[in-house]
Image (spheres, helix red, strand yellow):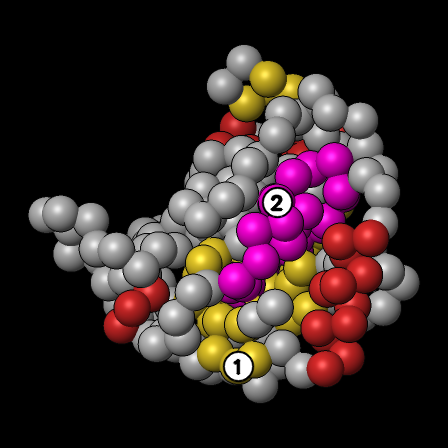
Amino acid sequence: MAVLLFHKPYGVLSQFTPEPGSSWASLAAFIDVPGVYAAGRLDADSEGLLLLTSSGPLQQRLTDPRWGHWRRYAVQVEGTVTPDHLQQLRSGMIVQGKRTLPAKAALLADPAVAERQPPIRHRLSVPTGWLELELREGRNRQVRRMTAAVGLPTLRLIRTAIDLMDGQAPLNLEGLAPGQWRQADSGENARLEGVLRRPAVHSPGRGGRAGGGKGGQGGAGG
Protein backbone atom coordinates (compact mmCIF):
# COMPACT_ATOMS: atom_id res chain seq x y z
CA MET A 1 0.00 0.00 0.00
CA ALA A 2 1.50 3.31 -1.10
CA VAL A 3 0.68 6.48 0.85
CA LEU A 4 1.97 9.98 0.10
CA LEU A 5 1.68 13.17 2.13
CA PHE A 6 1.50 16.22 -0.16
CA HIS A 7 1.48 19.92 0.69
CA LYS A 8 -0.95 21.08 -1.97
CA PRO A 9 -0.36 24.67 -3.06
CA TYR A 10 -3.05 27.15 -4.01
CA GLY A 11 -4.24 26.73 -7.59
CA VAL A 12 -3.83 22.95 -7.84
CA LEU A 13 -6.63 20.44 -8.43
CA SER A 14 -6.82 17.33 -6.24
CA GLN A 15 -6.70 15.09 -9.30
CA PHE A 16 -4.20 14.05 -11.95
CA THR A 17 -6.34 14.96 -14.95
CA PRO A 18 -6.55 18.66 -15.89
CA GLU A 19 -9.98 20.24 -16.22
CA PRO A 20 -10.69 21.33 -19.81
CA GLY A 21 -10.53 25.10 -20.10
CA SER A 22 -9.22 25.54 -16.54
CA SER A 23 -6.06 27.40 -15.60
CA TRP A 24 -5.62 25.26 -12.45
CA ALA A 25 -2.67 22.85 -12.41
CA SER A 26 -3.19 19.14 -11.68
CA LEU A 27 -1.37 16.78 -9.32
CA ALA A 28 0.58 15.46 -12.31
CA ALA A 29 2.66 18.65 -12.24
CA PHE A 30 4.03 17.65 -8.82
CA ILE A 31 3.70 13.88 -8.33
CA ASP A 32 4.90 11.16 -10.71
CA VAL A 33 4.04 8.10 -8.60
CA PRO A 34 1.73 5.75 -10.56
CA GLY A 35 -1.41 4.21 -9.08
CA VAL A 36 -2.10 6.69 -6.27
CA TYR A 37 -5.19 8.87 -5.91
CA ALA A 38 -6.27 11.56 -3.48
CA ALA A 39 -8.00 10.33 -0.33
CA GLY A 40 -10.56 13.08 -0.28
CA ARG A 41 -10.04 16.44 -1.84
CA LEU A 42 -8.99 20.01 -1.26
CA ASP A 43 -10.54 22.55 -3.59
CA ALA A 44 -8.15 24.21 -6.01
CA ASP A 45 -8.30 27.48 -4.05
CA SER A 46 -7.48 25.70 -0.78
CA GLU A 47 -4.05 24.59 0.43
CA GLY A 48 -2.44 22.11 2.75
CA LEU A 49 -2.24 18.43 3.60
CA LEU A 50 -3.55 16.01 0.99
CA LEU A 51 -3.09 12.26 1.40
CA LEU A 52 -2.75 10.07 -1.68
CA THR A 53 -2.93 6.29 -1.62
CA SER A 54 -3.12 3.23 -3.84
CA SER A 55 -5.62 1.63 -1.42
CA GLY A 56 -9.31 2.06 -2.23
CA PRO A 57 -10.41 0.84 1.22
CA LEU A 58 -8.11 3.37 2.91
CA GLN A 59 -9.52 6.16 0.75
CA GLN A 60 -13.00 5.20 1.85
CA ARG A 61 -12.11 5.00 5.55
CA LEU A 62 -10.37 8.38 5.55
CA THR A 63 -13.25 10.19 3.83
CA ASP A 64 -16.35 8.55 5.34
CA PRO A 65 -17.51 10.53 8.42
CA ARG A 66 -18.54 7.29 10.16
CA TRP A 67 -14.86 6.80 11.02
CA GLY A 68 -14.66 10.23 12.61
CA HIS A 69 -11.28 11.44 11.34
CA TRP A 70 -10.88 15.05 12.43
CA ARG A 71 -9.33 17.40 9.88
CA ARG A 72 -7.69 20.57 11.14
CA TYR A 73 -7.70 23.82 9.18
CA ALA A 74 -6.05 27.20 9.61
CA VAL A 75 -8.55 29.69 8.22
CA GLN A 76 -7.89 33.35 7.49
CA VAL A 77 -11.14 35.29 7.52
CA GLU A 78 -12.31 38.79 6.80
CA GLY A 79 -13.52 40.42 10.00
CA THR A 80 -12.79 40.18 13.72
CA VAL A 81 -13.33 36.73 15.25
CA THR A 82 -15.39 36.87 18.46
CA PRO A 83 -16.31 34.24 21.07
CA ASP A 84 -19.84 34.25 19.64
CA HIS A 85 -18.52 33.33 16.19
CA LEU A 86 -16.55 30.45 17.67
CA GLN A 87 -19.54 29.14 19.62
CA GLN A 88 -21.72 29.18 16.51
CA LEU A 89 -19.11 27.20 14.59
CA ARG A 90 -18.74 24.68 17.44
CA SER A 91 -22.45 24.08 17.85
CA GLY A 92 -23.26 23.11 14.29
CA MET A 93 -25.33 25.12 11.83
CA ILE A 94 -27.57 24.74 8.84
CA VAL A 95 -25.53 24.68 5.63
CA GLN A 96 -27.42 24.14 2.38
CA GLY A 97 -30.41 22.83 4.26
CA LYS A 98 -28.53 20.34 6.46
CA ARG A 99 -27.11 20.73 9.96
CA THR A 100 -23.37 20.30 10.28
CA LEU A 101 -21.85 18.08 12.94
CA PRO A 102 -20.40 19.88 15.96
CA ALA A 103 -16.93 21.23 15.21
CA LYS A 104 -13.91 22.41 17.17
CA ALA A 105 -13.10 26.11 16.77
CA ALA A 106 -10.53 28.37 18.39
CA LEU A 107 -8.92 31.73 17.80
CA LEU A 108 -5.52 31.32 16.15
CA ALA A 109 -2.65 33.75 16.57
CA ASP A 110 -0.88 34.59 13.33
CA PRO A 111 0.27 31.13 12.24
CA ALA A 112 3.70 30.42 10.76
CA VAL A 113 2.49 29.59 7.26
CA ALA A 114 4.18 30.03 3.90
CA GLU A 115 3.18 33.04 1.82
CA ARG A 116 0.50 32.20 -0.69
CA GLN A 117 1.21 32.62 -4.38
CA PRO A 118 -0.50 34.74 -5.54
CA PRO A 119 -0.87 36.69 -2.29
CA ILE A 120 -4.26 37.22 -0.66
CA ARG A 121 -6.00 40.41 -1.74
CA HIS A 122 -8.08 42.01 0.98
CA ARG A 123 -9.48 45.41 1.81
CA LEU A 124 -7.12 47.45 3.95
CA SER A 125 -10.07 49.04 5.76
CA VAL A 126 -11.40 45.67 6.93
CA PRO A 127 -9.58 43.69 9.67
CA THR A 128 -8.69 40.05 9.17
CA GLY A 129 -8.07 37.23 11.62
CA TRP A 130 -7.21 33.55 11.83
CA LEU A 131 -9.10 30.72 13.42
CA GLU A 132 -8.44 27.01 13.78
CA LEU A 133 -11.34 24.81 12.76
CA GLU A 134 -11.59 21.02 13.06
CA LEU A 135 -14.26 19.01 11.24
CA ARG A 136 -15.01 15.31 10.99
CA GLU A 137 -17.15 15.55 7.86
CA GLY A 138 -16.32 16.83 4.40
CA ARG A 139 -19.15 18.48 2.55
CA ASN A 140 -18.43 20.55 -0.53
CA ARG A 141 -16.75 23.84 0.48
CA GLN A 142 -17.98 23.31 4.02
CA VAL A 143 -15.44 25.46 5.85
CA ARG A 144 -16.09 28.41 3.55
CA ARG A 145 -19.84 28.04 3.87
CA MET A 146 -19.64 27.80 7.67
CA THR A 147 -17.49 30.90 8.12
CA ALA A 148 -19.65 32.84 5.66
CA ALA A 149 -22.76 31.82 7.62
CA VAL A 150 -21.40 33.53 10.75
CA GLY A 151 -20.32 36.64 8.83
CA LEU A 152 -16.62 35.82 8.39
CA PRO A 153 -15.83 35.25 4.70
CA THR A 154 -12.85 32.94 4.19
CA LEU A 155 -9.80 34.54 2.58
CA ARG A 156 -7.38 31.64 2.90
CA LEU A 157 -7.85 27.99 3.86
CA ILE A 158 -5.04 25.60 4.80
CA ARG A 159 -5.55 22.01 5.96
CA THR A 160 -2.82 21.50 8.53
CA ALA A 161 -3.48 18.02 9.94
CA ILE A 162 -5.51 14.81 9.69
CA ASP A 163 -6.16 12.82 12.88
CA LEU A 164 -6.03 9.03 12.46
CA MET A 165 -7.92 8.67 15.78
CA ASP A 166 -5.36 6.26 17.23
CA GLY A 167 -4.21 8.32 20.19
CA GLN A 168 -1.06 9.51 18.43
CA ALA A 169 -0.21 12.87 16.89
CA PRO A 170 -2.15 13.70 13.71
CA LEU A 171 -0.45 13.52 10.34
CA ASN A 172 0.66 17.05 9.49
CA LEU A 173 2.65 19.30 7.14
CA GLU A 174 5.88 19.25 9.14
CA GLY A 175 8.89 19.42 6.82
CA LEU A 176 6.83 19.97 3.67
CA ALA A 177 6.91 23.27 1.80
CA PRO A 178 4.08 23.99 -0.65
CA GLY A 179 4.45 21.67 -3.65
CA GLN A 180 6.54 19.09 -1.77
CA TRP A 181 5.50 15.52 -0.95
CA ARG A 182 6.96 12.51 0.82
CA GLN A 183 6.22 8.82 1.29
CA ALA A 184 4.62 7.80 4.56
CA ASP A 185 7.28 6.24 6.78
CA SER A 186 7.04 2.73 8.23
CA GLY A 187 5.43 3.92 11.45
CA GLU A 188 2.84 5.98 9.60
CA ASN A 189 2.09 3.06 7.28
CA ALA A 190 1.47 0.82 10.29
CA ARG A 191 -0.91 3.41 11.73
CA LEU A 192 -2.77 3.69 8.42
CA GLU A 193 -3.10 -0.09 8.22
CA GLY A 194 -4.60 0.10 11.70
CA VAL A 195 -7.25 2.49 10.36
CA LEU A 196 -8.51 -0.34 8.15
CA ARG A 197 -9.01 -2.63 11.16
CA ARG A 198 -10.99 -0.25 13.36
CA PRO A 199 -14.80 -0.18 13.46
CA ALA A 200 -16.80 2.92 12.60
CA VAL A 201 -17.28 5.37 15.47
CA HIS A 202 -20.38 7.14 14.13
CA SER A 203 -23.60 5.77 12.68
CA PRO A 204 -24.34 6.58 9.03
CA GLY A 205 -26.90 9.19 8.14
CA ARG A 206 -25.74 12.12 10.29
CA GLY A 207 -23.87 14.37 7.91
CA GLY A 208 -24.00 11.90 5.03
CA ARG A 209 -21.34 9.81 3.46
CA ALA A 210 -18.34 11.60 2.12
CA GLY A 211 -17.41 8.90 -0.36
CA GLY A 212 -13.98 8.26 -1.75
CA GLY A 213 -12.93 5.96 -4.55
CA LYS A 214 -10.41 6.73 -7.25
CA GLY A 215 -11.93 10.09 -8.01
CA GLY A 216 -11.15 11.26 -4.49
CA GLN A 217 -14.24 13.47 -4.42
CA GLY A 218 -15.18 13.17 -0.75
CA GLY A 219 -13.79 14.47 2.48
CA ALA A 220 -13.05 17.94 1.23
CA GLY A 221 -14.41 20.37 3.78
CA GLY A 222 -12.51 23.14 2.06
Relative placement, left or right, of 105 versus 217 is right
Q: Relative to 211, does residue 176 appear above or below in the rendering?
A: below
Mark 2: give few (<14), some (14-19) or many (20+) Cα within 10 Å: many
Which label sits on residue 182? 1
- Judging depth in this view, the residue of 31 and 126 nearest the camera is 31
Q: Amino acid at mark 2?
A: Gln
- Residue ID at (15%, 56%): 23
Q: Is residue 188 above or below residue 104?
A: below
Residue drawn 43% across the image and 65% down it: 35
**What kind of element bears circle 2?**
helix
Q: Which residues are magenta?
A: 49-76
Q: Amino acid at mark 1?
A: Arg
Q: Residue at 54% of width from left, 63% of height from top?
A: 53
Task: Give me the residue at 41% from left, 46% from top.
Answer: 215
Q: Is residue 67 magenta?
A: yes
Q: Residue furthest right?
A: 167
- The residue wearing badge 2 is 60
